[in-house]
Amino acid sequence: MAEITFEGVTKVFAGNVTAVDHLDLHVADGEFMVLVGPSGCGKTTALRMLAGLEEISSGTLSIGGRVVNHVLPKDRDVAMVFQNYALYPHMSVAQNMGFALKIRGESKDEITRKVAEAASILRLSEYLDRRPKALSGGQRQRVAMGRAIVRSPRAFLMDEPLSNLDAQLRVEMRVEIARIQRLLGVATLYVTHDQIEAMTMGDRVAVMRGGKLQQVAPPQELYDRPANEFVAGFMGSPPMNLLRVRTAPAEGRLALAVGAQRLELPRAYEASHELPTDADCELVLGVRPEDIEVVDEAGSGPTLRTRVERREALGAEILVHLALVEAGAPSSVAYDEDVAITRPSVLVARMAPQARVGVGDVLNVRLNEERLHFFDALSGVSLARGTA
């Protein structure tokens, strides 16, 4: 077992295309680190450099304190699990799991022992004589993991291992992989574009965008204290609502103009955020869907008048899409993969299924004044004091 360290690691492909840009990341011994981001953000390239499948353009990559920049993949003592399983169809489960040990020259008895131990951990003992075609997708993925486990590697590398599974199997395998990793206690770097996987599996989550690391933190901290607008908009399902607003005078206190409407801020934000005090400064206001509630009348505090545009019933909850009533309202910010786009101001609110709201209803909604987020309109950086 070992720790993993990226120090200023950069990968530049032909044509001067930078896939990973000065990545600094530390994975502690036994830690489950999830690397998440949209397609093309550099997360898989980072994993492949760690595995030795891509050369490093610059920087230092270490495993267990040993620099491995120029070490061959077979000598790095890491095991990689791919999304396509890569099982040998003509071999049994036991033969697939023990193949690397056979190539390494271990005895038949030792291979049998290690395969049996891994099969017990993976709950595959009754399937050892079957071939891959006789297994379900989840069972095949466990076999692929078993092939990695029997080698007793110093680190596990997983490249979107659940992407080929259906929704139900993905949920089951998320739990299974996390259980196995905790049991083995091996440093693991897990790559995914699915932020739900990242939130539910990782001890810590590293968010990437355009080859650059945006934030590294435990899942709940990422959700509660995003370092910038991108992390705020990427982490969460549905994502955080992001509205462009302007500061406005309010008898010595800060208020926000949201189109023709006005939000008064609690005084606590003056101490907890680096908010501009001048009038007509542009900001981005963020609020999570669960922090929006319907109130009978607009009153003091952060309330907005909205119209229901769409209602999505999800069983345990409903998602209500709310448009600001006033014409000429500013644009909100949404993310389509890695690119910021604008659309008419719409808030998505998470409500109980019993909520009596219908398309076309005009509602007064209150934003949870204890859980508002503010970002610089140009840089996207969080204005909360002390945000990493």
Image (cartoon, rainbow, N blue to C red):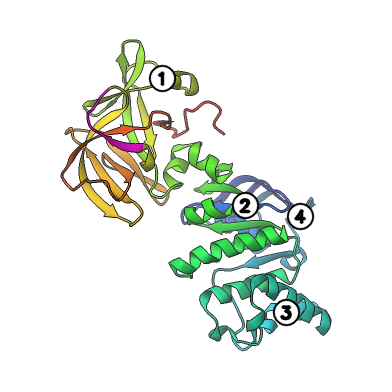
Is residue 297 one of those drawn in magenta? yes
**Labelled pair 3, 2 in contact (Cβ < 8 Å):** no
Q: Amino acid at mark 3?
A: Gly
- The quadrant of the rendering that contains the C terminus is top right
Q: Which mark is residue 33?
A: 2
First along the sequence among labels 2 and 1: 2
Rendered location of residue 362, percent (x, y): 17, 38
Q: CA distance from mark 3 to mark 2?
A: 27 Å
Residue drawn at (48%, 19%) of the image: 271
**Labelled pair 2, 1 in contact (Cβ < 8 Å):** no
Residue under pointer 3 = 98
Rendered location of residue 245, percent (x, y): 32, 29
Crowding at mark 3 (Cα within 10 Å: few <14, some 14-19, many 20+): many
Comparing 110 with 192, the one in front is 110
- Outermost residue, front side: 354
**Labelled pair 3, 1 in contact (Cβ < 8 Å):** no
Over which residues does the magenta segment extend? 292-299
Callout 3 secondary element: helix
Q: Amino acid at mark 2?
A: Met
Residue drawn at (67%, 72%) of the image: 146
Callout 4 secondary element: loop
Q: Amino acid at mark 4?
A: Ala
**Labelled pair 2, 4 in contact (Cβ < 8 Å):** no
**Labelled pair 4, 1 in contact (Cβ < 8 Å):** no
Q: Quadrant of residue 244?
A: top left
75, above or below 94, in the image? above
Q: Which mark is residue 2?
A: 4
Residue under pointer 1 = 276
Callout 1 secondary element: loop
5, above or below 83, in the image? above
Rendered location of residue 184, percent (x, y): 72, 61
